[in-house]
Image (cartoon, helix red, strand yellow):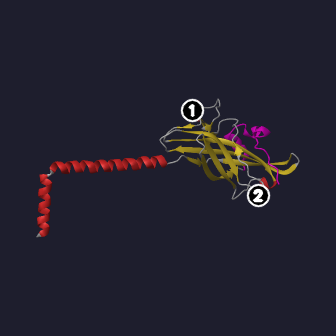
């Protein structure tokens, strides 16, 4: 009986204060909307750009060089890396440069210096029968394909860009790359103009067919003969 009276009193009070109830209702709705908006803003603000390595399309070849600069057992490894940058933030970002670290046979006492990206000799392509598809690359323009296939450093808000990069490792002894299961472990780094570093790790498959590698990037085998494309051979302690 007391509960019935209480509910009855509550209904009478609500009917007598309809305006107050409407005001309270809109205040509650406003607070919920503000809370959800603030949560969405914070979540978006704390999302960070992400670097990715497309392992399915990235490849490398291994070439034995023999004696270089008086040191024997030199190996040159040529990496074609497809790097993707995802920018989920509300502001554009600018990629300053890319570097690559290759897992070596021995990490100590010699420091594992990062490799700098070098210019491709031509655009990376994918051949299917008589059809040739030109693929995107970072920074370098080529006559083949439209200019929009060359990616600049700027990644717009909520945008994703992916393109190819060339790295050449020439090293000897314990600084030769480590091979694990027919692939070489690598760490790709993208440095932004804000100073932030983005990192991605992957295992890059070694292609035994160098002719097929040449078909991907015509002229690449001659291109990497030039020592200007090599990242310097580091001496061992």
x%, y% of residue 106? Answer: 76, 58
x%, y% of residue 26? Answer: 25, 48
Q: Is residue 156 visible?
A: yes
Give residue 192's quadrant in the image.
top right
Q: Is residue 226 visible?
A: no
Give residue 147's quadrant in the image.
top right
x%, y% of residue 145? Answer: 60, 32
237 versus 82 height, above or below: below
Considering depth in this image, is 210 or 121 the residue closer to the camera?
121
Residue marked by disc 2: 108
132 versus 234 height, above or below: above
Identified at 58% across, 44% down, the residue is 84
Considering depth in this image, is 92 or 135 the residue closer to the camera?
92
Circle 1/circle 2 CB separation < 8 Å = no
x%, y% of residue 219? Answer: 73, 37
Residue 211 lies in the magenta stretch: yes
**Residue span colored magenta:** 208-237
Considering depth in this image, is 95 or 55 the residue closer to the camera?
95
The disc at residue 148 is 1
Identified at 57% across, 32% down, the residue is 148
Q: Is mark 1 on a helix, strand or loop?
A: helix
């Amino acid at each position: 009986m007391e509960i019935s009276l209480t509910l009855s009193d509550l209904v009478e009070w609500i009917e007598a204060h309809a305006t107050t109830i409407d005001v309270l209702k809109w205040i509650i709705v406003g607070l919920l909307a503000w809370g959800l908006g603030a949560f969405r803003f914070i979540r978006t603000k704390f999302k960070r750009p992400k670097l990715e390595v497309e392992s399915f399309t990235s490849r490398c070849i291994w070439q034995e060089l023999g004696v270089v600069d008086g040191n024997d057992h030199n190996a040159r490894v040529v990496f074609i890396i497809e790097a993707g940058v995802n920018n989920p933030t509300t502001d554009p970002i600018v990629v300053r440069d890319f570097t690559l670290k290759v897992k070596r046979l021995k990490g100590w006492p010699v420091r594992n210096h990062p490799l700098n990206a070098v210019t491709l000799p031509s655009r990376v392509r994918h051949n299917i029968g008589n059809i040739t598809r030109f693929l995107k690359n970072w920074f370098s323009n080529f006559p083949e394909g439209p200019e929009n296939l060359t990616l600049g450093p700027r990644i717009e808000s909520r945008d994703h860009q992916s393109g190819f990069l060339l790295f050449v490792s020439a090293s000897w002894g314990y600084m030769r790359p480590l091979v694990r299961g027919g692939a070489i472990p690598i760490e790709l780094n993208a440095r932004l103009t804000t100073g932030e570093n983005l990192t991605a790790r992957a295992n890059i498959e070694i292609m035994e067919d160098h002719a097929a590698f040449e078909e991907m990037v015509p002229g690449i085998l001659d291109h990497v003969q030039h020592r200007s494309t090599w990242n310097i051979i580091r001496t061992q302690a």
